[in-house]
Image (cartoon, rainbow, N blue to C red):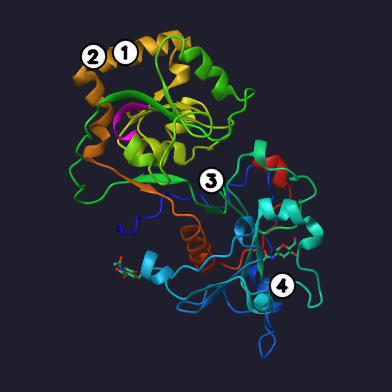
Amino acid sequence: APAPAPAPPRRRGGGGSREAAAVPAAAAAAACAGRPRPRGCPAPGAPGGEVNVLLWWEPFGRPRRMADCRRRYNITGCRLSADRSRYGEAQAVLFHHRDLALHGAQGLPRGPPPRPPRQLWVWMNFESPSHSPGLRGLAGLFNWTMSYRRDSDVFVPYGHLYAPPAPRPFVLPRKTRLVAWVVSNWNEEHARVRYYRQLQEHLAVDVYGARGLALAEGGVVETVSAYKFYLAFENSQHTDYITEKLWRNAFAAGAVPVVLGPRRANYERFIPPDSFIHVDDFPSPRLLAAYLKFLDKNKPSYRRYFAWRKKYEVHVASFWDEHFCKVCEAVRAAGNQIKTVRNLAGWFES
Ligand SMILES: *[C@@H]1O[C@H](CO)[C@@H](O)[C@H](O)[C@H]1NC(C)=O
Ligand SMILES: *[C@@H]1O[C@H](CO)[C@@H](O)[C@H](O)[C@H]1NC(C)=O
């Protein structure tokens, strides 16, 4: 297993259009001052204390073994559980949006017992706004957000770059093919399919997935590594919505990503400007095709897309262990701030 990667920079509670209602810490502490301490009132910031994190729904209804956060990420004192009888002692409860949308708000915990005053309800979502039904009606319910957005309370991107003290030397995989694309959800309405249709008039693209060539299960990285370029086209275009299509399918495979997603400037908040090609860099798919053909014939120009590898390595997020452990860590790091996400839909869709 690769060494745990350092966390990417986190900007806690940037909040978009949310309002964080700050209540004096003393008032918050008073609610938990009873002796014995009321249930649900462990001090989250207590160093060395255990943090109980409850998963209200297992994502997509698939039960899984809970991660050992200490072994995998050197995060100690986490007790992750999907056992609802532990609700009262949980400092944080995670609600996965897709399952919440499926069950409706009536599926949320309802008293008795009442919602413990210090308990954090964490809204967790890794789909884009275009694929997140039912965002309305969730205002004022949650304390924290957890998503791929950098301004989430718990920011877990699909991947990130890190600069190890001594990066492993990068060896460019042997390239025998030009452009690959893996797509499972084929939708003619998607910008990515429309762009592909124009691009393939000028350039042969090997399409894998439901509509194309068969891909061995788990074989994406190996297959793509033989290609010079990979179409890291997102299913929808939103702020910070940059998925495993970039991190795993392209970067981990050692292919140069051709991206279609948020704007170039948004990508550059996460990765070096010379590590990728953006479709917006070209006035037309025809000119992009011409550029890719140029790079195919010009090795030094092509190799420049790997210069950043001297300094950085790629970390691809591991669903869901990394996510749950990160929440645990964030709960421990949090102070006594009281916070409610007032305008979830407005923020997430911005
Ligand atoms: C694990 O975390 C502890 C405390 O944060 C730190 O002192 C230690 O160096 C870390 N170990 C590794 C292997 O990163
Ligand atoms: C969490 O949000 C609820 C609902 O707005 C609020 O009553 C509670 O005080 C918040 N708790 C924390 C710890 O922020």
Most foreground residue, 148 or 295: 295
Label 1 and label 4: CA atoms lie apart by 61 Å
Q: Residues within 10 Å of mark 3 (few under 14, many from 20)?
A: many
* Image quadrant containing the N terminus: bottom left
Per the image, the residue denoted by label 3 is 148
Most foreground residue, 217 or 26: 217
Is residue 226 part of the magenta span, yes or no? yes
User: The disc labelled 2 sits on which kind of residue?
Assistant: Lys
The label on residue 297 is: 2
Disc nearer the start of the sequence (3/4) = 4
Range of the magenta residues? Answer: 224-229
SS under mark 2: helix
Give the number of the mark in front: 2 or 3.
2
User: The disc labelled 3 sits on which kind of residue?
Assistant: Tyr
Label 3 and label 4: CA atoms lie apart by 27 Å
Say whether mark 4 is within 8 Å of ligand 2: yes
Residue 66, x across and y down, in percent: 50, 69
Per the image, the residue denoted by label 4 is 117
Per the image, the residue denoted by label 1 is 293
Give the number of the mark in front: 3 or 1.
1
Label 4 and label 2: CA atoms lie apart by 64 Å
Q: Is residue 55 left or right of residue 135?
A: left
**Quarter location, residue 277:** top left
Disc nearer the start of the sequence (1/4) = 4
Reply above or below: 287 against 344.
above
Q: Is residue 325 left or right of residue 107?
A: left
Q: Residues within 10 Å of mark 2 (few under 14, many from 20)?
A: few
Most foreground residue, 90 or 65: 65
The reply to whether callout 3 and callout 1 are in contact (CB within 8 Å) is no
The reply to whether callout 2 and callout 1 are in contact (CB within 8 Å) is yes
SS under mark 1: helix
